[in-house]
Amino acid sequence: MGLFDRLLGNNQSQSPLTKREPAKKKEEAFFLDADSSSSMGNVDFMRQSNTIRRTFPGTAASPGSKEIVDEVASMTARRVIKSDGLGDPKKPEVQTDLTGGIPKEVKKTFCEPMSQAELDERKRGSSVGVNVPGGPAAINAQKQQEKAQQDQAQPSTPASTSKPGDIGAFKGWVKDL
Protein backbone atom coordinates (compact mmCIF):
# COMPACT_ATOMS: atom_id res chain seq x y z
CA MET A 1 0.00 0.00 0.00
CA GLY A 2 2.96 2.27 -0.31
CA LEU A 3 1.50 3.97 -3.37
CA PHE A 4 -1.61 5.13 -1.55
CA ASP A 5 0.45 6.15 1.44
CA ARG A 6 2.60 8.41 -0.72
CA LEU A 7 -0.42 9.91 -2.48
CA LEU A 8 -2.26 10.59 0.76
CA GLY A 9 0.83 12.00 2.39
CA ASN A 10 1.56 9.37 5.00
CA ASN A 11 5.34 9.49 5.13
CA GLN A 12 6.16 7.08 7.90
CA SER A 13 9.69 5.79 8.13
CA GLN A 14 10.13 2.16 7.31
CA SER A 15 11.06 -0.19 10.03
CA PRO A 16 14.49 -1.80 9.84
CA LEU A 17 12.87 -5.24 9.61
CA THR A 18 11.38 -4.55 6.20
CA LYS A 19 14.66 -3.63 4.57
CA ARG A 20 16.17 -6.45 2.59
CA GLU A 21 19.75 -7.40 2.94
CA PRO A 22 21.70 -8.93 0.05
CA ALA A 23 22.15 -12.71 0.18
CA LYS A 24 25.55 -14.01 1.06
CA LYS A 25 27.31 -15.77 -1.79
CA LYS A 26 29.39 -18.85 -1.26
CA GLU A 27 32.59 -18.78 -3.28
CA GLU A 28 32.79 -22.38 -4.46
CA ALA A 29 34.16 -23.16 -7.94
CA PHE A 30 31.98 -25.47 -10.01
CA PHE A 31 32.89 -26.45 -13.60
CA LEU A 32 31.24 -28.80 -16.06
CA ASP A 33 33.15 -30.84 -18.58
CA ALA A 34 32.62 -30.08 -22.29
CA ASP A 35 30.17 -32.94 -22.88
CA SER A 36 27.97 -32.11 -19.88
CA SER A 37 27.83 -28.39 -20.58
CA SER A 38 26.69 -28.72 -24.19
CA SER A 39 23.03 -28.74 -25.09
CA MET A 40 23.32 -30.75 -28.29
CA GLY A 41 21.68 -33.85 -26.99
CA ASN A 42 23.28 -37.28 -26.98
CA VAL A 43 26.89 -36.44 -27.81
CA ASP A 44 27.98 -40.07 -28.02
CA PHE A 45 25.35 -40.74 -30.69
CA MET A 46 26.54 -37.73 -32.67
CA ARG A 47 30.17 -38.76 -32.50
CA GLN A 48 29.65 -42.25 -33.90
CA SER A 49 30.17 -42.63 -37.62
CA ASN A 50 27.39 -43.92 -39.87
CA THR A 51 27.89 -45.75 -43.13
CA ILE A 52 25.60 -44.72 -45.99
CA ARG A 53 25.39 -47.01 -49.01
CA ARG A 54 23.71 -45.86 -52.23
CA THR A 55 23.20 -48.08 -55.27
CA PHE A 56 22.34 -47.05 -58.83
CA PRO A 57 21.41 -48.96 -61.98
CA GLY A 58 23.82 -49.02 -64.87
CA THR A 59 23.37 -47.23 -68.18
CA ALA A 60 23.88 -48.28 -71.78
CA ALA A 61 27.27 -46.58 -71.81
CA SER A 62 28.26 -48.04 -68.43
CA PRO A 63 26.39 -51.31 -67.69
CA GLY A 64 26.22 -53.02 -64.30
CA SER A 65 25.10 -51.80 -60.90
CA LYS A 66 26.91 -48.81 -59.40
CA GLU A 67 27.54 -48.10 -55.73
CA ILE A 68 28.69 -45.23 -53.49
CA VAL A 69 29.60 -45.87 -49.85
CA ASP A 70 30.14 -42.85 -47.57
CA GLU A 71 31.20 -42.82 -43.94
CA VAL A 72 29.68 -39.80 -42.17
CA ALA A 73 30.27 -38.49 -38.64
CA SER A 74 29.25 -35.20 -37.02
CA MET A 75 32.45 -33.41 -37.99
CA THR A 76 33.86 -35.51 -40.85
CA ALA A 77 32.70 -37.23 -44.01
CA ARG A 78 34.68 -39.44 -46.35
CA ARG A 79 33.93 -41.51 -49.41
CA VAL A 80 34.90 -45.13 -48.95
CA ILE A 81 33.82 -46.66 -52.29
CA LYS A 82 32.75 -45.08 -55.59
CA SER A 83 32.06 -47.17 -58.69
CA ASP A 84 33.38 -46.06 -62.05
CA GLY A 85 30.89 -44.33 -64.32
CA LEU A 86 29.04 -42.39 -61.59
CA GLY A 87 29.19 -38.69 -62.28
CA ASP A 88 32.81 -38.74 -63.26
CA PRO A 89 33.91 -35.19 -63.96
CA LYS A 90 34.48 -34.60 -67.64
CA LYS A 91 37.81 -33.11 -68.52
CA PRO A 92 37.37 -29.79 -70.31
CA GLU A 93 38.44 -29.88 -73.91
CA VAL A 94 41.50 -27.80 -74.58
CA GLN A 95 40.85 -25.29 -77.31
CA THR A 96 43.87 -24.50 -79.38
CA ASP A 97 44.09 -20.96 -80.72
CA LEU A 98 45.94 -21.01 -84.01
CA THR A 99 46.17 -17.24 -84.34
CA GLY A 100 48.76 -17.05 -81.56
CA GLY A 101 47.63 -13.68 -80.31
CA ILE A 102 47.44 -12.07 -83.72
CA PRO A 103 44.62 -9.51 -83.65
CA LYS A 104 41.78 -9.78 -86.15
CA GLU A 105 41.33 -7.23 -88.90
CA VAL A 106 39.05 -4.37 -88.05
CA LYS A 107 35.74 -4.53 -89.88
CA LYS A 108 34.77 -1.39 -91.73
CA THR A 109 31.45 -0.15 -90.43
CA PHE A 110 31.13 3.10 -92.31
CA CYS A 111 29.05 3.57 -95.46
CA GLU A 112 30.68 3.18 -98.86
CA PRO A 113 29.25 4.56 -102.11
CA MET A 114 27.41 1.95 -104.17
CA SER A 115 26.43 1.90 -107.82
CA GLN A 116 22.81 1.34 -108.89
CA ALA A 117 23.70 -2.02 -110.47
CA GLU A 118 25.27 -3.23 -107.22
CA LEU A 119 22.23 -2.06 -105.26
CA ASP A 120 19.89 -3.95 -107.62
CA GLU A 121 22.03 -7.07 -107.25
CA ARG A 122 21.86 -6.86 -103.44
CA LYS A 123 18.09 -6.36 -103.51
CA ARG A 124 17.58 -9.66 -105.30
CA GLY A 125 16.36 -12.36 -102.94
CA SER A 126 16.32 -10.09 -99.91
CA SER A 127 13.46 -8.70 -97.91
CA VAL A 128 13.46 -5.33 -99.65
CA GLY A 129 10.31 -6.22 -101.63
CA VAL A 130 8.24 -7.25 -98.63
CA ASN A 131 6.48 -3.92 -98.19
CA VAL A 132 5.44 -3.46 -101.83
CA PRO A 133 1.79 -3.81 -102.90
CA GLY A 134 1.05 -7.50 -103.42
CA GLY A 135 4.00 -8.57 -101.28
CA PRO A 136 6.46 -11.32 -102.23
CA ALA A 137 3.80 -13.14 -104.26
CA ALA A 138 3.56 -10.18 -106.66
CA ILE A 139 7.34 -10.07 -107.03
CA ASN A 140 7.47 -13.82 -107.79
CA ALA A 141 4.69 -13.46 -110.36
CA GLN A 142 6.58 -10.62 -112.03
CA LYS A 143 9.77 -12.72 -112.16
CA GLN A 144 7.86 -15.62 -113.75
CA GLN A 145 6.40 -13.32 -116.40
CA GLU A 146 9.88 -11.99 -117.24
CA LYS A 147 11.18 -15.55 -117.49
CA ALA A 148 8.29 -16.57 -119.77
CA GLN A 149 9.01 -13.60 -122.04
CA GLN A 150 12.67 -14.58 -122.26
CA ASP A 151 11.72 -18.18 -123.11
CA GLN A 152 9.37 -16.99 -125.91
CA ALA A 153 12.06 -14.73 -127.34
CA GLN A 154 14.47 -17.66 -127.69
CA PRO A 155 13.86 -19.86 -130.74
CA SER A 156 12.73 -23.37 -129.84
CA THR A 157 14.71 -26.33 -131.16
CA PRO A 158 12.88 -28.67 -133.55
CA ALA A 159 11.97 -32.12 -132.18
CA SER A 160 13.72 -33.88 -135.09
CA THR A 161 17.15 -32.73 -133.86
CA SER A 162 16.68 -34.26 -130.42
CA LYS A 163 18.41 -37.48 -129.54
CA PRO A 164 16.50 -40.73 -129.10
CA GLY A 165 15.21 -41.16 -125.51
CA ASP A 166 15.30 -37.40 -124.82
CA ILE A 167 12.53 -36.28 -122.43
CA GLY A 168 12.73 -32.59 -123.35
CA ALA A 169 9.26 -32.71 -124.93
CA PHE A 170 7.78 -34.05 -121.70
CA LYS A 171 9.50 -31.29 -119.69
CA GLY A 172 7.90 -28.73 -121.97
CA TRP A 173 4.44 -30.24 -121.42
CA VAL A 174 4.97 -30.09 -117.64
CA LYS A 175 5.96 -26.41 -117.87
CA ASP A 176 2.76 -25.67 -119.83
CA LEU A 177 0.65 -27.28 -117.11
Image (cartoon, grey):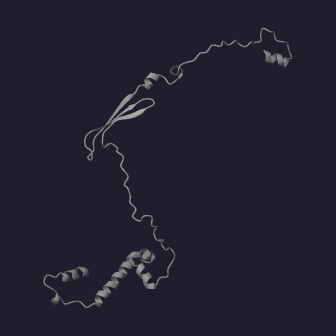
Residue 120 in the image: state x and y as whole percent. 42, 82
The residue positioned 47% from the left and 23% from the top of the image is 43
Please tell me in which quadrant of the rendered image residue 18 appears.
top right
Q: In the rendered view of the protein, which quadrant contains the N terminus?
A: top right
The residue positioned 25% from the left and 91% from the top of the image is 155
- Tell me if 58 is positioned left or right of 89 in this view: left
Q: In the rendered view of the protein, which quadrant contains the C terminus?
A: bottom left
Residue 19 in the image: state x and y as whole percent. 77, 12
The total of numbered circles placed on residues is 0
Front one among 138 and 33: 33
Residue 149, compared with residue 87, is above or below; it is below
- Tell me if 110 is positioned left or right of 137 in this view: right
- Tell me if 119 is positioned left or right of 11 in this view: left
The residue positioned 19% from the left and 81% from the top of the image is 170
Residue 136 in the image: state x and y as whole percent. 39, 75
Residue 175, compared with residue 20, is above or below; it is below
Farthest left residue in view: 164
Residue 52, compared with residue 62, is above or below; it is above
The residue positioned 38% from the left and 56% from the top of the image is 94
Front one among 39 and 169: 39
Farthest front residue in view: 100
Farthest top residue in view: 17
- Tell me if 101 is positioned left or right of 57 in this view: right
Residue 21 in the image: state x and y as whole percent. 74, 12
